[in-house]
Amino acid sequence: MTKLKHVYLVDGSGYIFRAYHALPPLTRPDEYQGDLLGDINRRRGKIVSIEAKDTSTVLSAEVPLAEMFGYATAIRSLSKGRAAYSMEPFRFEPVPANIVTTILDSAKGKPAARA
């Protein structure tokens, strides 16, 4: 099942899985640490590690792909253009029940996506 801006995988068990992407070390100046950590938490991300290096901090996190759209703009705004990031596919995890309901409700009456 594919939905605009979201990638889901449905296996034979009937579970819906969502893509998680890893944010390999995100480097930002120390002064923006709180704002950027808050933004990752708001996106339902999981902080994997935080390292201090000179006057900057290196953060690694795992975040659902569906929550990463618009992140480039957000990180630029939150850090006044001074933070950098990248992301790479990491794994699929089952979608929580409350989000499955939202996905299914929004898909009702719409044609199935083509593979």
Image (spheres, grey):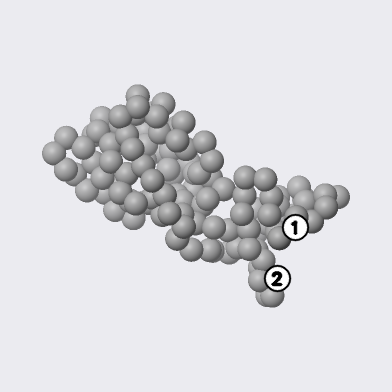
Residue at 21% over, 37% down: 56
Q: Farthest residue in the front direction?
A: 115
* Disc 1 target residue: 114
Report the side of 48 relative to 108 (left or right): left
Residue at position x 63%, y 63% from top?
A: 9
Q: Can residue 98 be seen in this view?
A: no
Badge 1 marks a residue whose secondary structure is loop
Residue located farthest toward the bottom when viewing the structure as drawn? 12
Q: Mark 2 and 1 residues: CB-CB less than 8 Å, in contact?
A: no
Q: Earlier in the sequence, mark 2 or mark 1?
A: 2
Residue at the (67%, 66%) spot, across then down: 10
Classed neighbour count for the residue bearing mark 2: other residues with Cα under 10 Å, few (<14), some (14–19), many (≥20): few
- Residue bearing the label numbered 2: 14
Q: Is residue 30 above or below residue 50?
A: above
Vertical side of 29 occupied by 66: above or below: below
Asked if residue 76 lies left or right of residue 16, the reply is left
Amino acid type of disc 2?
Gly
The answer to which of 78 and 24 lies nearer the viewer is 24
**Residue 21 image point, x, y percent:** 46, 54
Is residue 79 shown left or right of residue 106? left
> Quick one: quadrant of the N terminus?
bottom right
| Mark 2 vs mark 1: in front | 1
* Kind of residue indicated by mark 1: Arg
Residue 51 horizontal/vertical position (percent)? 22, 48
Residue extending farthest to the right is 109
Q: Position of residue 33 (x, y in %)?
A: 30, 36
Q: Residue 31: image x %, image y %? A: 25, 30
